[in-house]
Amino acid sequence: MQRLIKDVNIVAIPLASKVHGEEYYRNVLGVFERVLKALGVKFVDVVDSEEVVDGIAKRDVDAVLLIFLTGGTSRLGRLVARKFRDKPLVLIGHTYHNSVASMASVYSRLASEGGYNLIPFVYRGGDSIIDLTRIYKAVRAAVALRKMRVVQLDADKLDDEGILFSEKIGASVVLVSRNELRKRIEEVKTRASRELKRLVERYDLGGIDRDKLVEPFALYVVAEKIVEEFNAHAVTINCFPFILEFKFTPCIALSMLLDEGVPAACEADYRALTLLALAQLLTGKPGWIGNFTDYDPVTHQVTFSHCTVATSITEHSTLVSHFETGTPYAVEGRLRKQVYTIAAISPDYSTMAVAKAELLESGMLTGGRCRTQAILKVEEVDPRPLTEKLVSNHHVLMVGDVRYELSIVAKVFGMKFVEY
C-alpha cells in the first residue's frame, strides 16, 4: 500500500489578499509548509489575484488543500474551488486576519451550490495541527482507494459485487481464472515445500500435519507473485467455491498477505476489502474481517469471528481445521487487548457505520464458530440495540480509534457516516 500512497498527489493552494501585507502572510504560510511538506504535500505559489488562478495546473492533482492565509480571499477561493470541483477540497482557515471569515464564506456558498466535496477546518495552533494531519491522511487514503488495483483469484468473471465496488470506489479489478490458478499452484508446489519455513515462523503449529501445509502455502506464493506481476495492491477470493474445488482453504494465504501489508479479503467481500485497505492506509497495520456472531444489549458486548487474522495483530496464532468444512487450515489468533474501531459499509455503499470498542477476550473461545473469535465492549452512541443498526454482517476491526479519519473518508465518497 505504500506504493499506492506514493501515487497520490495532494496540492496545497495558499490564498492571500495584498491588503494584509506579504510579510505577514508569508510567515503564516511557513507554519503550514513546515508541517504539510513533511507529509508530502506540494505547494503552489501564493494566489493573490484572479490571473494567478488561471495559471494553476489541474492535471494529475488528486485533492486540494485550500489555505486561506488572510481575509479578503472569498472570491479567489471560489474560483479555485470551481476549477477543482471534482476533487476533494479541504478548506483551511486560521483564527487571525479574517482568514476563517473567508473560509466560512466560501464553504457556505459552495455548499449551497452543491456538487462539491468540502471539508472545512479551522487551524487554531497547538494540537489542532494534529487534526489537520489526520484530515490529510484520511483524504490521502480515500484518494488511494480510487487508484487501487485488486486481484480476484479463482474468478472467470466479475460478479455484481465486484462491479459495484468498481463503480462506487473507482478501483480496478483484474481476474485470475480457476484454470490459471490451478496451473500456478502446481508449478510452485516444489518451491513451496522448500520454503515452508516462511510459514512455520508465523504460527504455532502444534500437532499440524506439515504435508498438508504445502498447498495452502503454495497459494500464498502464487498470490504474492500475482500481486507483483499485475502491480496490484489488494487481493480477494470467493472462499467456499475455492475450498470445494481445491480441498484446502485460502485462510493461510490471506493471513500472510495481510501480514505483508496487502489487504486480502475472504468471501469476495469487496466492501470488507475496502475497509481492510483503509485499515492498512490509516493505521499501518492490517485489519481483521469478522462475522457478526453475538450481541448482548445489556452489557454492549459484541462477538465477531473469522479465520484469516494476520499474525502481526495477535499475541499468538496457530492453525486448526476450518470450521465449516474441516479442511486444512484456518487461522486461530489471540488479538492484542486494546482499543479498536469496528467499521462496516452497507451493501449499496451509501452508509459507513463505525464504533469504538475495547477488546475483552479473543482466541478460539468455542468450537462452534469460526476459529478466531473476539468479544468486544462497544461504545454505543445510538440507544437502539446494535442488531437494529447493523449495515452489514462483515465488520472490520482496525487498531486504535480512527473514527474521525473514517468520517472524512465517508465524506469523500459521499457516504452517510453513522456511529453505532
Image: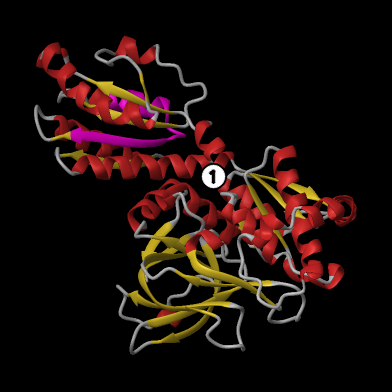
Please provide the residue range marked out in magenta. Answer: 76-93
The one nearer the camera, 304 or 317, is: 317
Write the residue at 82% across / 50% down.
191
Q: Measuring from the top left, give residue 385's x and y in whole percent.
A: 38, 83
Question: Residue 39: in sight, yes or no?
Answer: yes
Q: Measuring from the top left, give residue 205's x and y in whole percent.
A: 66, 71
Task: Give amino acid for label 1.
Answer: Leu
The stretch drawn in magenta includes residue 84: yes
Write the residue at 51% across / 59% down.
312
Q: Is residue 312 above or below residue 333?
A: above
The stretch drawn in magenta includes residue 49: no
Q: Is residue 50 above or below residue 128?
A: above
Which residue matches tag 1?
145
Which quadrant does the C terminus fall into?
bottom left
Q: Is residue 55 above or below residue 12?
A: above
Judge left or right: residue 240 versus residue 402: right
Which quadrant does the N terminus fall into?
top right
Write the residue at 86% across / 69% down.
245
How packed mark 1 is, by other alpha carbons closer than 10 Å (few <14, some 14-19, many 20 or more), is many
Q: What element carries label 1?
A: helix
The one nearer the camera, 301 or 57, is: 301
Q: In which quarter of the image is residue 341?
A: bottom left
Q: Measuring from the top left, give residue 382's x and y in whole percent.
A: 32, 75
Write the residue at 75% across / 81% down.
326
Judge left or right: residue 99 versus residue 402: left
